[in-house]
Structures are given as structure tokens and as C-alpha cells.
Image (cartoon, rainbow, N blue to C red):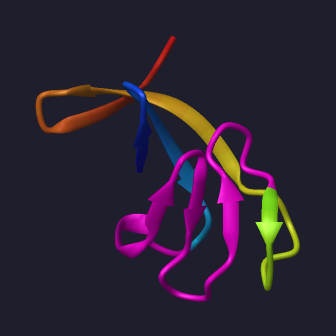
Amino acid sequence: MASNVGVKVMLDTGCSLAKGTLDGTTVTCGCHGSQFDVANGAVLRGPACRAVRSRVVQVQGDLLAEAS
């Protein structure tokens, strides 16, 4: 999950982005170095070749819920 300016976004990459880094709206995967735009899941730098699913979530206690 990435957080930027109070907006939390979860990306579904198949890798855990928990060990990735966030710089502005760009998250870099700690597994393979691909970079994604957290706003829309677009690939900014490979080796990934497909966009990932991106969704806005809300933190409710210890749980994440997709924002409505």
C-alpha cells in the first residue's frame, strides 16, 4: 500500500510492495525494480510489462477497505 497526501492506494502486482519505496506518486517494487504510478497502476519502468490494478482504500482500524 502506498500513501501520498492523505490518499492511500493499494496496487495488485503479485509481489509485496511493502518492501518497495514511494517517491511522489511512483512506487518502486523491492522484488524486481519495476516502477508503477500509484494513481492508475501504469508501468513507468520495467521489467513489468503490464499495468497493475490500483484502488483507493480506507484504513479502518487494522483493516483495509476499498473506498466507495
On screen, residue 22 versus residue 48, left or right, reads left
Q: Is residue 19 above or below residue 26?
A: below
Q: Residue pushed farthest right? A: 49
Residue 44 drawn at (x, y percent): 80, 63
On screen, residue 36 versus residue 14, left or right, reads right
On screen, residue 52 versus residue 38, left or right, reads right
Q: Could you tell me which residue is drawn at 51 percent across and 56 percent down? A: 23
Q: How many discs mark residues in the rendered view?
A: 0
Q: Nearer the viewer, residue 56 or 33?
A: 33
Quarter of the image holding residue 62? top left
Residue 7 drawn at (x, y percent): 44, 27
Q: Nearer the viewer, residue 5 or 67?
A: 5
Q: Is residue 41 magenta?
A: yes
The stretch of residues the image draws in magenta is: 15-42
Q: Could you tell me which residue is drawn at 68 percent across and 68 percent down? A: 35
Q: Could you tell me which residue is drawn at 72 percent across and 56 percent down? A: 52
